Image (spheres, rainbow, N blue to C red):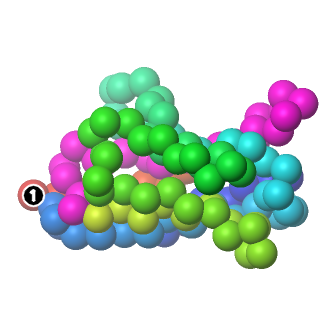
Amino acid sequence: VQLQASGGGSVQAGGSLRLSCAASGTILYLDPVAWYRQAPGKQRELVATSFISGTTNYVDSVKGRFTISRDNAKSTVYLQMNHLKTDDTAVYFCNAQTNWGTIYWGEGTLVTVSS
């Protein structure tokens, strides 16, 4: 499975963006799927996770602002980002895992939030 992230761009603080992660195959067996981000000079950080069960988890800094979702029919995972802050500026990566331990990464998409 190949993952292709898109939807990044430049936005002013308070704005919104929706990131998409399109998989080359079905995502029905990918559990969980997740979004990570890496800001300049910082380590990669787990932002949001979505499990097949419906459970979602978020890092504290984005709770209430970001929403992860998955559309199995379109083999796509989304990250809706609202009320963006300058601290959200980073390269965002999608990630997926299988029950047998395979890990997939997509190429990053840059999100720049200006004040």
* Residue in view at x 31 percent, y 36 percent: 60
Q: Is 55 left, or right, of 103 in this rendering?
A: left
Is residue 96 magenta-colored?
Answer: yes
Q: Is residue 73 left or right of residue 15?
A: right
Of 56 and 15, the residue lying toward us = 56
Task: Please provide percent x and percent y for residue 50.
Answer: 59, 48
Q: Residue at x 48, y 34 (%)?
A: 46
Q: Is residue 55 or residue 48 the one in the foreground?
A: 55
The answer to whether one can see residue 35 in this image is no
Residue drawn at point x = 19 percent, y = 53 percent: 85
Whole-percent x and y of residue 20? 57, 66
When asked about the image quadrant of residue 21, the answer is bottom right
Residue 98 at x, y percent in the picture:
82, 38
User: Residue at 22% of width from left, 43% of height from top?
Assistant: 87
Task: Specify the segment rendered in magenta.
Answer: 83-107
Q: Which residue is mark 1?
A: 115
Mark 1: which amino acid? Ser
Name the secondary structure under disc 1.
Answer: loop
